[in-house]
Image (tube, rainbow, N blue to C red):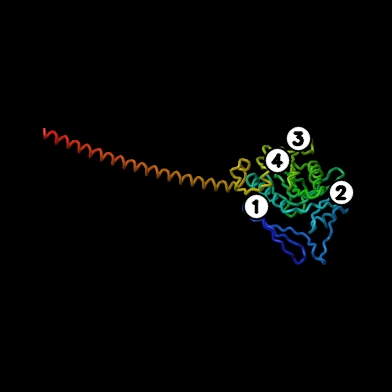
Amino acid sequence: METLTLDSNRSTDNDVHYNSQCKNNNDQLHEFTVKYPSNHSQDFHVDPSHDGKHVTEQEYWDIYYEDPEFKYEWKNGILEEKEMPVVGDFMLKFFFESLIDEYLKSNPIGLFCIEDIAFKLKLGNDLSIRRPDFALILTSNTNHPESTDHSYTGTYDLCVEILSDSQKKYVEKDTIIKKDEYAKVGVKEYYIIDNKQKHTAFYTLSDARKNTFKKIKPVKGVIHSKILPGFQFRIADLYLQPNLKTLIEDDVYQSYLLLDYQLQCQRAKSAEQRAESAEQRAESAEQRAESAEQSALSERKARLKAEKELERLKKMNKNN
């Protein structure tokens, strides 16, 4: 598991800030702040959530889209508050993003990964504005956003929602409502990653039924993306979150994970093997030298013995 540290402190505005540090699987340190209102200050006022409030689309964009306290989506004139994430959600998100980032380094078929940037979904007479926890736009997508855009005017190719499973309405929104909406507007793949593992599911558009998702069935616990060739991951690893360096010899990840590091390891291993071969050759040469020396010594001993025997025979002949 990765290292996570939390330091809470009370700021001047009486919020409680959790300044968190999380090491990702490249040993890089990520910092994030989770801010929760304090209930211990009598003179502190927190604006209530506007969940369920009727507002126009323009009011949503102007007032509520960048609300500092709550994260809102919008559907048919009604504000919908998004679920407050927990620390485990951040950990899941970091790990999955690390895998995607590594894949895109060697397979540049996606523009970039996007977090919390809204896109509009028009479904007949229904209109929704959704903010996926994580989204990806493929280079093949005809709608490329500008760097200054506050929202995306196209349709994402991959949407990921991290589910904490804290309330029934949030579960139903991600597993039923958004699943239906994303399929109907043509999102190619939709992943639900549940912190409690009960509702985790992976979908891709069905070839047989238009604007409908079908489940991506894991093969021996491994999910294979249909729109990202070669991108695959073990479901269990989403929750175990092993250090990526420990996965480079795993067949599931070897084709795309930490390729530069893999090359360094291969070079180091080759150098080590060359050093071992040189050492073995030196040992063999030393053994041959020792063997040659022993053979020469044996020959000298044999020659001396033969010379003594010859001398003995000569003396015997003289005596006779």
Q: CA distance from mark 1 to mark 2?
A: 41 Å
- Say which label, 1 or 3, has the lower sequence index: 1
Q: Nearer the viewer, residue 84 or 212?
A: 84
Which of pointers 4 and 1 indicates the residue nearer the eye? 1
Q: Quadrant of residue 33?
A: bottom right
Q: Amino acid at mark 4?
A: Ile
Q: Amino acid at mark 3?
A: Asp
Q: Identify the residue at image location x=20%, y=38%.
A: 308
Q: CA distance from mark 3 to mark 2?
A: 30 Å
Using the image, determine if residue 260 lies above or below residue 6.
Answer: above
| Residue 254 spot, x, y in % from top left | 60, 43
What residue sits right under mark 1 in the picture? 2
Which of pointers 1 and 2 indicates the residue nearer the eye? 1
Q: CA distance from mark 4 to mark 2?
A: 31 Å
Crowd around label 2: few <14 · some 14–19 · many ≥20 (10 Å): some
Q: Does the CB distance between marks 4 and 2 fall below 8 Å?
A: no
- Say which label, 1 or 2, has the lower sequence index: 1
- Say which label, 4 or 3, has the lower sequence index: 3
What residue sits right under mark 2 in the picture? 76
Crowd around label 1: few <14 · some 14–19 · many ≥20 (10 Å): some
Using the image, determine if residue 159 lies above or below residue 69.
Answer: above
Q: Amino acid at mark 1?
A: Glu
Using the image, determine if residue 131 lies above or below residue 68.
Answer: above
Give me the disc on residue 207. 3
Q: Does the CB distance between marks 1 and 2 fall below 8 Å?
A: no
Q: Amino acid at mark 2?
A: Asn
What residue sits right under mark 4 in the picture? 227
| Residue 206 spot, x, y in % from top left | 76, 36
| Residue 9 spot, x, y in % from top left | 72, 63
Using the image, determine if residue 69 lies above or below residue 111.
Answer: below
